Amino acid sequence: MKINNNQLLRFTTAGSVDDGKSTLIGRLLYDSKSIFEDQLEAIENTSRQRGHEGVDLALFTDGLRDEREQGITIDVAYRYFTTPKRKFIIADTPGHIQYTRNMVTGASTANAAIILIDARHGVIEQTKRHAFIASLLNIPHIIVCINKMDLVDFNEEVYNDIIKQFEAFSSKYIVTDIRFIPISALLGDNVVHRSENMSWYNGGALLHTLETIHISSDYNKVDARLPVQTVLRPQRDGFLDYRGYAGRVASGLLRKGDAVTVLPSGFTSIIDSIQGPSGELDEAFAPMSVSITLKDDIDIGRGDMIVRTTNIPETSQDIEAWLCWLHNNSAKPRAKYTIRHTSNEQKAMIKEVLFKININTLAHNTEDKDLNMNDICKVLIRTTQPLMVDSYRENRSTGSFILVDENTNETVAAGMIV
C-alpha cells in the first residue's frame, strides 16, 4: 500500500500507572533515531544521577519536574517525530483516574489510540475506562499493546488470554479497527523492530503498524461542511469586487459549480471559484483551508456554514451531547456559558443532566447530577441561536464543541453531540 510521505498521524497513549507508556514512547523515539543529541545527553545525565545502568527512556516524555521526581505522567505530553514513511504527533496522556480530562484532551484529535496493558495484570478497570473514552471520542483505530512480555517469559498463552479478556468487554463499543501487539517497551521487542523472543507472533512491530495504518478514510468525505471563519475583501487591483468566504473544510468535498446552501439563513447559490494558498482549485476537501466565492451576493459572516444543498446538517437550539467536565470548579445550575462550535459562538446553558457515567463501572448514575472535574455525563444543552450540527459519530468536526466560562474565558467542558 502506498503511503503519503506528508501524511500526518496523530496518536494518543493510555494505560494504567506504571504500564510503561512513557517508556514505550521513549523507545519509539530512541530506536527510530528521532532524538536530538543534546536531549539524549541530558537524559543520560539524569539517568546516571538516579543510578540507572542504561538510559531511562521514560524521561523523554516526562517533561514536568513533578513528573520526573515522581516517575509518573500528570499532564498531556506532546511529542513530534518523523520517519521516511510518515509524520507523527504523540499525545502521552496520564493514567491516573483524576486526570481523565487530560486523556479526553489528548485523544480528541487522534487518529489512533495505543492502550497499554501490563501482561502480568491483564485487563483491569483502568483498561476498560480508557477503551470506553477512546470509543466515546470515536477514535477510528485502537492498538492494544500488551507490554512487559519479558516479565511473563514471552508466553503466547498469556497474550492470547488478554486478547480474549479485552474482546469480551470491547465488543459493545463501536470501534471498527482493534489490533493487538505483544511488546516489551523496556527491551524494545516489537516496538520498532520485530522481536526474536516472540517468533509465534506473525504481525508487524508497533512502528510498522503506525506507518502503514490507513487513515485517509478517517475523514468524513460525504457531508460537505465549510464553517466560515472570515469574509475576505481585499479591495485592491484585480480584487475590487472579490468577496471570499474563508474557512477550513470540516468534512466532505466541495467543487466549482456545486449547488450550496448557506446556514442558518437557508439562501442557496452556486460555487463560482475556490482559492487555496497556492492558487485556484477545482475542488476542496477536509482538512484544507480555502476561500470560496459564490455566484450570488449573500450576506454571510463568521459562524455561518456553507453546505451542499443535497446534504444539510440538523439546525437546532436543543442539543443532546456527551460532556466531559474539565474545570476545577463544578458546574453551576442553569448557568450561562459560551458554546464554541466550529467557527460559531453562542450563549448556552446546561438545561438538564440526564445521567453521569461511573468511570469505574461504566454504569449510568441518574441520581447524582452535580458536574465536577473529570465527570463524563449525557446532557441537554439549550443555545440562544441555532447551531448547524452533525452527530459526533458521523462527523468529529461538526459534532464537537467546548463550553467556555463567560467571566474567566476558561474552557470548562468538552462536548460530543449525540
Image (cartoon, helix red, strand yellow):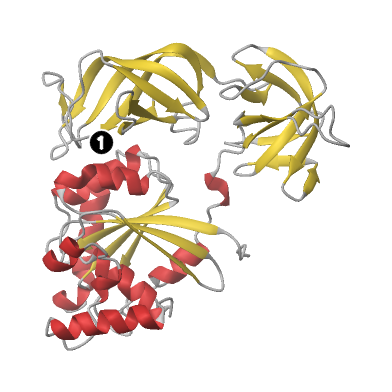
Count how many numbered circles sit on residues in the image. 1
Quadrant of image for the N terminus? bottom right
Residue depicted at x 25% and y 72%: 59
In front of the other: 278 or 223 = 278
Q: Can you tell which quarter of the image residue 346 is in? A: top left
Q: Give the labeled residue for mark 1.
A: 326
302 displayed left or right of 146: right
- Number of residues whose C-alpha sits closer than 10 Å to that of mark 1, classed few (under 14), some (14–19) or many (20 or more): many
Above or below — where is 6 with respect to 171?
below
Residue at 59% from the left image edge and 14% from the top image edge:
264
Where residue 170 appears, as percent x and y from the top left, is 28, 45
The secondary element bearing badge 1 is classed as loop
Q: Position of residue 196 (x, y in %)?
A: 33, 85
Q: Residue at point 43% right, 76% down?
A: 34
Does residue 195 appear in the picture of this structure? no
Residue lying farthest to the right in this orientation: 238
